[in-house]
Image (tube, rainbow, N blue to C red):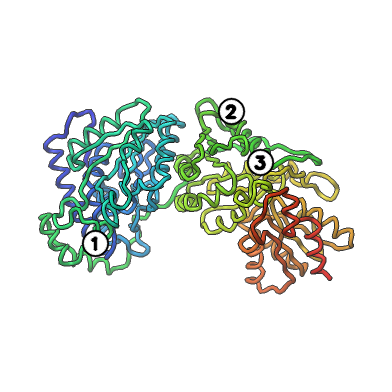
């Protein structure tokens, strides 16, 4: 059924209260049935947050017949484990049937996974890792503000998850940007897996918000429909520049007497005997055998919702051509390309391109973008975990979102946040400066040498590494115009414009970047050096040395690493000698990728990998490269030895 509550009313009618109670009984039954049928799941939190969810869906804008309705409000379940409650409620509101839910819950290949996912109609975001949902919700709420839209964002959170530090990052950010279209609802049942929240890790949740200037509402009885309705309505209807948190005091496993306030039911379903007892308490028929039989049938997939990327029209703007002889850091070329994208797409109050930085605006060259599009530029402070997750929320609204910081902070530090964006097809453009040994004097803690290895673990992300300012310009414009999660990395130092043998610009005005396509900077018959990024100039110098020695060596630049140009790799194999050179951990980067391609093709060649074989030190990039055999002379020597 569908319940529509009028928030302008002072209180719920007796009929509405009766309807809510009837819905609660059905939902509680399905929560208990689904988890017992699956033999796993989280009934306790599902029952404690159920009443607040029921009223929320009765108030908010949504339409089961149009799950992608542009005007819909967004609900983010930071407590993704309460999926039984979410699915039960969505069934009540007509997104699918209870039969769909009960027959498929937690079955391989079904549309009803153990933690909420977007394949379920009505679910907005894949969640499960606690502490992430608020940042996603903040991204959505800020995105709606940037787009001048009136949609509201409601995020349901647990009390135990507030022990995670990322949450305070999101709390501060929401206050700074006055996100009054954001409502946080906290299921304050005071229990988590190992006991009470006070025993496990005491904290004052309300003060986390109040000290950061949120509007804090406390409900002593979170199961009081009228009290929650009145509080939620007030938060929903206000427009005062202050985000709201509703701390709702609830009871774990509410409604089943022998389950209430017992921590184990956080993640333990009822056994058969206990389930029968619970059904009797609810006053409903025990249908376990019926559904158990139905679950023996092939799993149904009809409800699975396919991901659809937002439709965004983006102009790549006018490419910039850097002339031969120019020395420029790629990050400056990135900043100029980003400004060009803003000039081509962000007009008046219509923002298409968005940018996020973490107290490094100048270093990552976002200053021009900030000046042109202050409405779409977000300064997140030194809060990379929040920023990376927030970027996913922003991007999901069709904002082409560039998240930029140093490599160590954009990749290694936020690995799981990027992973969740990958799950969610978030289409975030992570552009990291200061990667590899090229960071130089800042030392090994800041020398990100695992960017490719880590991003290769994701299934929905691309990795591009420009060789010079011209290729940087084309890659940045390319990623703005195509959907998908992308990592683009670059060093810190100035680098020469790559030229052809005749001295003309290689990545010239006729060049178009293509994902999965390598660039033959030089051709040769004796050997091929496969490389990318900051070490390309050293490889070019090595080529000159080898040429002077009479060796014909090709240089294959892999500006696109994921996807990799396997055909080009096999073309390189035809020379019989292949050397890979990279400013990356030698075991997990391009060398391993090329080796895999060669092995799977059944080719036997002379092959050598050059890369970072130990943590770098603090010194000039040229010295650090030389210490690990990545300077021009060392590359030439290694290649020559293979030819002799």
Q: Which residue is mark 1?
A: 269
Mark 2 Cα within 10 Å, few/some/many (few <14, many 20+)? some
Say if mark 1 contacts mark 3, CB within 8 Å. no
Badge 1 marks a residue whose secondary structure is loop
Residue 291 shows in this picture: yes
Q: Does dot 3 land on a helix, a strand or a loop? A: helix
* Residue 419 image position (x, y, % from top left): 48, 53
> Spatial distance from mark 1 to mark 2, Cα to Cα?
55 Å
Within 10 Å of disc 3 (Cα), the crowding (few <14, some 14-19, many 20+) is many
Could you say which disc has been placed on residue 321 in the image? none
User: Dots 2 and 3: beta carbons under 8 Å?
Assistant: no
Picture coordinates of residue 50 (x, y %)? 23, 47
Q: Position of residue 109 (x, y in %)?
A: 37, 63
Q: Nearer the viewer, residue 69 or 74?
A: 74
Circle nearer the N terminus (1, 2): 1
Residue annotated with mark 3: 331
Identify which residue is drawn at 67% across, 53% down: 617
**Residue indicated by mark 2:** 372
Q: Quadrant of the C terminus?
A: bottom right
> x, y percentage for residue 560?
64, 53
| Residue drawn at 24 percent across, 56 percent down | 263
What residue sits 33% from the left and 50% below the top? 201
Q: Quadrant of residue 341?
A: top right
Q: Please name which of the two marks, 2 or 3, marks the residue nearer to the observer.
A: 3
Q: How far separated are the C-alphas under marks 1 and 3?
A: 53 Å
Instruction: Find numbered disc 2 in the image and state the secondary structure of the residue it sits on.
Output: helix
Quarter of the image where one finds residue 148: top left
Contact? badges 1 and 2 (CB < 8 Å): no
Q: CA distance from mark 2 to mark 3?
A: 18 Å
| Among numbered discs 1 and 3, the one appearing first in the sequence | 1
Q: Residues within 10 Å of mark 1 (few under 14, many from 20)?
A: many
Classify residue 278 as left or right of residue 118.
left
């Amino acid at each position: 059924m569908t319940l529509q509550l009028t928030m302008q009313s002072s209180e719920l009618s007796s009929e509405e209260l009766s309807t809510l109670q009837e819905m609660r009984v059905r939902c509680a039954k399905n929560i208990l049935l689904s988890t017992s049928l699956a033999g796993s799941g989280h009934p306790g939190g599902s029952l404690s947050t159920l009443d607040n969810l029921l009223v929320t869906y009765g108030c908010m804008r949504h339409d089961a017949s149009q799950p992608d309705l542009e005007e819909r409000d967004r609900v983010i379940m930071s407590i993704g484990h309460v999926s039984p409650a979410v699915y039960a409620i969505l069934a009540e509101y007509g997104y699918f049937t209870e039969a769909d839910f009960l027959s498929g819950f937690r079955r391989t290949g079904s549309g009803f996974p153990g933690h909420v996912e977007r394949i379920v109609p009505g679910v907005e975001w894949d969640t499960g890792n606690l502490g992430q949902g608020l940042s996603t919700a903040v991204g959505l709420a800020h995105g709606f503000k940037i787009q001048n839209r009136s949609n509201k964002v409601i995020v349901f959170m647990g009390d135990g998850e507030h022990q995670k530090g990322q949450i305070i990052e999101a709390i501060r950010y929401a206050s700074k940007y006055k996100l009054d279209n954001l409502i946080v609802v906290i299921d304050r049942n005071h229990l988590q897996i190992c006991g009470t929240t006070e025993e496990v890790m005491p904290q004052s949740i309300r003060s986390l918000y109040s000290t950061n200037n949120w509007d804090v509402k406390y409900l002593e009885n979170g199961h009081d429909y009228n009290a929650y309705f009145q509080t939620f309505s007030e938060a929903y209807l206000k427009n005062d520049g202050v985000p709201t948190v509703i701390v709702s005091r609830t009871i774990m496993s509410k409604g089943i007497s022998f389950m209430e306030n017992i921590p184990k039911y956080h993640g333990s379903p009822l056994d058969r005997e206990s389930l029968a007892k619970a059904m009797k308490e609810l006053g409903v028929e025990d249908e376990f055998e019926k559904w158990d039989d139905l679950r023996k049938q092939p799993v149904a997939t009809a409800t699975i919702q396919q991901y659809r990327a937002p439709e965004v029209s983006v102009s790549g703007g006018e490419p910039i051509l850097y002339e031969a002889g120019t020395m420029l850091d790629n990050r400056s070329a990135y900043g100029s390309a980003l400004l060009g994208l803003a000039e081509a797409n962000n007009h008046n109050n219509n923002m298409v391109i968005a940018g996020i930085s973490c107290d490094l605006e100048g270093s990552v060259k976002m200053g021009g973008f900030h000046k042109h599009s202050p409405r779409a530029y977000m300064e997140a402070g030194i809060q990379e975990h929040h920023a990376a997750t927030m970027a996913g929320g922003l991007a999901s609204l069709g904002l082409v979102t560039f998240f930029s910081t140093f490599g160590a902070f954009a990749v290694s530090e936020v690995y799981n946040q990027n992973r969740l964006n990958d799950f969610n097809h978030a289409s975030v453009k992570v552009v990291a400066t200061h990667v590899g040994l090229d960071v130089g004097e800042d030392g090994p803690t800041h020398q990100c040498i695992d960017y490719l290895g880590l991003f290769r673990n994701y299934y929905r992300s691309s990795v591009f590494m420009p060789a010079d300012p011209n290729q940087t310009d084309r890659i940045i414009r390319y990623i703005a115009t195509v959907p998908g999660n992308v990592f683009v990395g670059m060093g810190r130092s100035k680098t020469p414009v790559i030229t052809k043998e005749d001295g003309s610009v290689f990545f010239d005005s006729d060049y178009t970047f293509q994902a999965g396509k390598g660039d033959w900077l030089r051709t040769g018959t004796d050997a091929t050096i496969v490389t990318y990024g900051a070490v390309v100039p050293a490889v070019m110098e090595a080529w000159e040395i080898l040429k002077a020695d009479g060796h014909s060596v090709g240089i294959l630049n892999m500006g696109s690493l994921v996807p990799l140009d396997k055909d080009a790799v096999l073309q390189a194999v035809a020379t019989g000698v292949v050397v890979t050179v990279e400013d990356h951990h030698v075991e997990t980067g391009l060398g391993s990728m090329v080796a895999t391609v060669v092995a799977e093709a059944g080719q036997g060649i002379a092959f050598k990998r050059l890369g970072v074989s130990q943590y770098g030190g603090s010194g000039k990039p040229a010295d650090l490269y030389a210490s690990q055999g990545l300077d021009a002379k060392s590359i030439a020597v290694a290649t020559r030895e293979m030819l002799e």
